Amino acid sequence: MTQIKDCTALITGGASGIGLLMGQMLLERGAKRLIVWDANPENIETARTSLAPFGRVDFDRIDVADTEAVISALSRLKADGVAIDLLINNAGIVVGKPFLEHTHADIDRTLTINTGALMHLTRALLPEMTARGRGHVVNIASAAALVSNPNMSVYAASKWAVTGWSDSLRQELERTETGVRVTTVLPYYIHTGMFDGVRSRIIPILQPKNVASRILRAVEKDAVFLHMPTIVRFLPLLRGLLPTRALDFVLNRIFGVASSMDNFQGRIQTSQDTKGSHR
Ligand SMILES: NC(=O)c1ccc[n+]([C@@H]2O[C@H](COP(=O)([O-])OP(=O)(O)OC[C@H]3O[C@@H](n4cnc5c(N)ncnc54)[C@H](O)[C@@H]3O)[C@@H](O)[C@H]2O)c1
């Protein structure tokens, strides 16, 4: 079982949304030290103020797409004697447009931030965790890893890839008894602003506090997967049982999944936002 009390945690994209809430909850549950990496300086300043009452937080403006910056930030932490017990790979972006409206830069940036960056950071940190015989890596994927709806093509691809990689890694680490755990998280839409404008016909949009707290509970239990809400768990079963057109009917005509992104706005981009950001 992973202990949150006295742990040192690193959260990417930890200055907003569920990353910020998970940071606050980790401190409330007795984490010794929280390291937040985020690319957006405005979010960092807001988070600095809101997390100050809860405990020690070290902020670093890191774009996780920049592998060299990631590796040197990890080296600095190591040189300062910081050993990370819990890594939450949370930073992510969405473009939210039909595939043909993506620029080539949109495609590359989404795949780099949502997929490649998780692999590079984990690859750089894992040797320390395995040497210590403990650690926990949490990868925030999405329910979009199990269902591909319109206007989410590249985002869905990035999250399918993360899910496959994350669970393969989990099995490797278990098979070799490293003591390092991996949890893959697949939430439906969450009210954080990242997906502002989406509509959900039957399944309620998730509340960020509830999501953050369930992720931490999953960490404590060393859960392999966390699907939110529970119905998301059954998507692979439905896919196996139903012919594709019947599945399309159920998801699109009944649950309204195909039109859920029709009014997507996402976040309003600020001057300080990350390059090639959310829209
Ligand atoms: N919001 C949803 O509906 C939803 C649903 C399923 C999964 N998710 C996933 O949950 C995670 C968190 O989402 P959220 O809703 O809290 O989003 P958010 O936009 O509130 O927070 C994301 C944070 O990541 C940071 N970030 C973006 N690119 C970065 C980069 N290159 N380097 C470092 N930091 C970067 C942003 O500055 C922001 O502070 C994402 O991986 C997202 O894909 C979100």
Image (cartoon, helix red, strand yellow):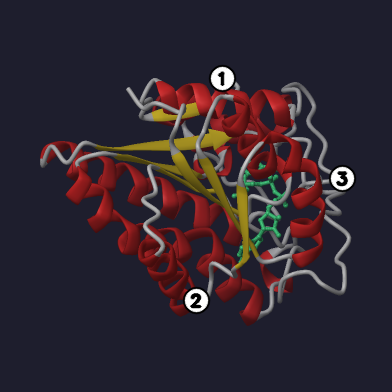
Q: Position of residue 236 (x, y in %)?
A: 43, 30
In the visual, does 106 lie left or right of 167?
A: right
In the visual, does 82 lie left or right of 27?
A: left
In the visual, does 224 lie left or right of 216?
A: left
Relative to 148, residue 225 above or below: above
Image quadrant where residue 26 sits: top right
Residue at the location (52% across, 27% down)?
Answer: 216
Q: Of residues 115 and 58, which is closer to you in this image?
A: 58
Residue at the location (42% across, 54% down)?
Answer: 161
- Disc 3: CA contacts within 10 A as few (<14), some (14-19) or many (>=20): some
| Mark closer to the chain start, 1 or 2 | 2
Relative to 90, residue 212 above or below: above
Residue at the location (39% across, 48% down)?
Answer: 84
In the picture of the structure, the residue carrying the numbered disc 2 is 69
Residue type for callout 3: Gly
Residue type for callout 1: Ile
